[in-house]
Amino acid sequence: MKILKYNYTFNYKHILILKYNKIKYLVNNINIYNNIRYISYFFNLNKINLSTHSWIQCDNCYNLNYSRVIKLKYYICEYCNYHFKMNSFDRIYILIDFNTWNSLNEYLFSKLNFDENKLYNYRNLTGLTESIQIGIGTINNIKITLGVMDFEFIGGSMGSVVGEKITCLFEYTISNFIPLILVCSSGGARMQEGSISLMQMAKISSLLYEFQQKYNLFYLSILSSPTTGGVISSFGMLGDIIISEPNSTITFTGKRVIEQTLNQTIPENSQISENLFIKGLFDLIIPRNLLKKSIIDLLKLHKY
């Protein structure tokens, strides 16, 4: 699909024309069913009310970004390059080749009898059944498996279903001998599930050891802001290559908890990805708009 270049001075009419051309391309495609999510992306997937959310304020420089334009810019502030949070649908859209995404275990539910009203609210808000989407697709015609965590669903917390989905993704990857990519954005283990969520760390890590040592397959871990708790202390930091987005919060626990435990003040930016990169915790820090190209280069480097 041809990517249209534009400058930031064009008006709302040009945006509508750009959207119309892309939607027309989708509708004319034969496989309409698989394009529903891509079409909904251009119809404003998050159901933003234009009367109140036409502009998004940057948390870093406090300038206003037009919501329609910032989607086309990978949710990066055009003034200071600050990276806004992205949902899992948008991440899949910018990483996976068009019309190649197929979800796996999309309707896997937990059998734990928790309050369904809260879960229903999150499902209705995000369009997800859990805090991760897994599936298969291609990147530059290279077949891969992909898991994308969504912070909008209960803070991207890792519960029993998330652990099972990631385990199934590893098993599918092993059976097909293809590379695996996990995009992490999580507050850690889901405390409402207690020891069940805690055991997901051991469950995933043990299978990941077999994945890397016995089958020698490639696992790429991408950390976005925030990635904390049980995710960062298990599969998040076990990738063959670990990539972080700029200015991301990567830590096991929060700054306030550390200070209260140690009774001392820690440096302000000690949990920011740039500082951790200097300490050797990551291999690369890559801006979101260059991420797909970098992944393609890494896959080629590993002879896929």
Image (cartoon, helix red, strand yellow):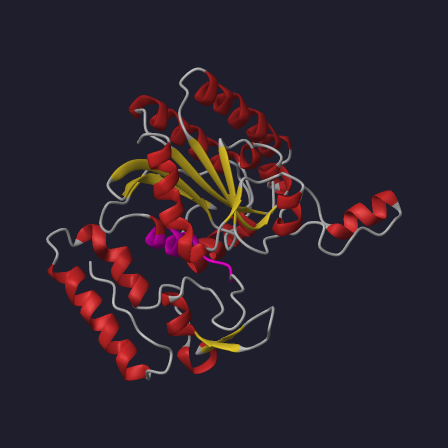
Q: x%, y% of residue 219?
A: 44, 32
In this image, 40 relative to 224: left or right?
left
Q: Which of 74 and 170 is in front in this view?
A: 74
**Residue 127 appears in the picture as rendered:** no
Vertical position of residue 39 compared to residue 256: above or below: below
Screen quadrant of the C terminus: top left
Most extreme residue toward the top, as rendered? 214
In this image, 250 relative to 153: left or right?
right
Q: Which of 175 and 177 is in front in this view?
A: 177
In this image, 164 relative to 283: left or right?
left
Q: What is the chief secondary structure element of the magenta stretch?
A: helix
Vertical position of residue 272 compared to residue 298: above or below: below
Screen quadrant of the N terminus: bottom left
Most extreme residue toward the right, as rendered? 263
Q: Is residue 88 magenta?
A: yes
In this image, 257 relative to 116: left or right?
right
Q: x%, y% of residue 174?
A: 36, 23
Please report the bounds of the magenta region as a residue range: 84-94
Q: Residue at x 62, y 39 (%)?
A: 281
Q: x%, y% of residue 117?
A: 51, 53
Vertical position of residue 143 compared to residue 95: above or below: above
